Image (spheres, coloured by chain):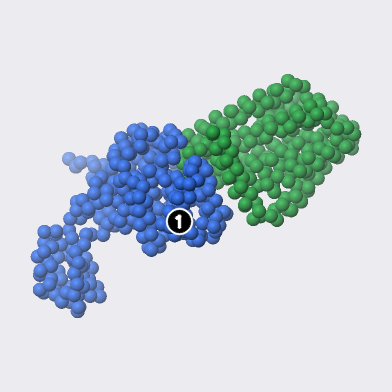
Chain colours: A green, B blue
Amino acid sequence: MKVKRYLRLLGIQLKASGLLSLQYRADFFTEGLTSLFWTFTALAPLFVVYSERPSIEGWNFGEALLVVGWFTLLQGILEGAINPSLTGVVEHIRKGTLDFVLLKPADAQFLVSTQRFQPWRAFNVLTGIGLFVYAFMHLGRWPSVTGLLASVLLLGTSTLLLYSLWILTVSAAFFVVRVDNLTYLFTSIFDFARWPSSVFQGVGRGVLTMVFTYVIPLALMTTFPAQAMLGRLPPQSLVGAVVGAGLFAWGSRQVWLRSIRRYTSASS
Amino acid sequence: MISVRGLRKHYKVHKRPPGLKAALRSLVHRSYTTVKAVDGISFDIRPGERVGFLGPNGAGKTTTLKVLSGLLYPSDGEVTVDGHVPQKREEAFLKKIMLVMGQKQQLLWDLPPAETFELNRAIYDVPQAQYKKTMSDLIELLEIGDLIGKPTRQLSLGERMKCELAAALIHQPRVLFLDEPTIGLDVAMQATMRTFIKEYNEKYGATLILTSHYMDDVAALCPRVIVIDKGLLSYDGGLDALVQRVRPEKRVVLRLSEEVDAGRLSPLGRVVTHESGTAVLQVQQEAVNATITRALSTLPVMDLTVENAPLEEVMSELFAESKARRTAASEPVPA
């Protein structure tokens, strides 16, 4: 009953976002162009590095391209589905209109997380899929069915992780009000996810790889699904990713609930 | 319906003197002061009552409303609204109440109000049949039929406020908190809002708490007022009784057929204003009859009315009184 109600709510929020997006149709083309441009600039270092040597830390060009593909795809999800809503929260907090969200008899985290989608921004999802196809053509083989299924599962965990990280960032807005800098910090850190996590093994005796696996789980988001597509991901890593993402989501939910309690609303 | 016992809400606020030096010092050593927004107030409100919260800016009116609607945790005291403890924010409670804020809006800015209505219908789980009925009532009462299809950003302030009210009432709240609902509206629109709010209260038996800077709102809507000043309750009772207490004098308004000297008016009472053929006199209540008789016999009176002092004046006198009391209390008694 409850699930049905929330699904209906999601449907209505999606409809409202859809209506809005139709008002800004031109965005589709500008987003498409920007996405292609950024993908090209993201690929440039890859071409430079791989023209010198055939593989880095066990990743050849085609395989590293898969990681970039996952990075691009997740960026599409981030900008199309996660970012717009959660940037809205920061606005709500600043203007004090979060009051209206908290007055509603529905979960506040759900309401703010689904308030806005920007489908045109999700162009990167298509670019990411394009990169997968190109990468596998380059590798001269196709992924196995189990590999594909595992990577689809990991798409879910990656999205959950990304969303949870954003919830944590947004929760900070209850304490500092101006959260713009934090979001910049977040996007710059997320940028590391375009490389296979083992690339950082040389830095500080693998400390960075550890950090990106367990603290800010970037490796789980892009490297794991790429490995799964290649059929190289050990089953325990898959389980670890699912459990880890669940724990991370639970943790961020607790932080959100605590932040809400602290919220005292802008004075009118 | 609403019971408030010893409600306190204190904020810890970071405070520093102006200037770069103080700003740098405050990075390391922060000093805090406690602001007592609400400092121990108690009252009860019966179902269906219309109560006005009055008080100067920063008196604690909005804070009290926010505690009552579950947005703020009280620092101390007990609050119940229709059997619920507001800060628990239970769904059953939230479905019964609504807070309308004149300075903040919930309508989706780029979409027509109808979209917000639809969203609220889903959030509040309002059955389709009831929604249709309520909506057609609201559209008729507020005359917003032409507006709900236009993007919100294209509506005027008054039109938007009417749609805000409609959005707030889709779930037929039994308790309605109105925080400055008529702010920034023109006189005609204010009157429309008042009529509507009163009709809603009468039709659905909803309990209503209103804060407003426009005394006309309070006078038209609220038989009972609660005056809050500096977080303390300084009056709770009928509006008429309040006026009687603070300003027992009446005002006799005389419209004169020809100009008269000020000297002819002053024996009748204190002259409040006297210009272009209209004179306003302030007289003791028991002297009203005598004053009228005398005015009619000595002055060229065309028309005459007896009124209470304007509420604005009553309020500012009340606030000045309590301020003076506070100052007196805080000053050391001379030996």
- Residue extending farthest bottom: B258
The answer to which of B63 and A139 lies nearer the viewer is A139
Q: Is residue B8 visible?
A: no
Residue B248 appears in view: yes
Q: Is residue A56 above or below residue A104?
A: above
Measuring from the top left, give residue A103's x and y in whole percent. 46, 41
- Rendered location of residue B332, percent (x, y): 23, 41
- Label 1 belongs to which residue? B139
**Residue found farthest to the front:** B129
Residue B188, x across and y down, in percent: 38, 63
| Residue type at the position of mark 1 | Ile
Name the side, left or right, on which B297 lies relative to A62: left
Q: Is residue B333 above or below residue A144?
A: below
x, y percentage for residue A159?
67, 35
Residue depicted at 29% across the width and 57% down the height:
B312
Say left or right for B43 vs A46.
left
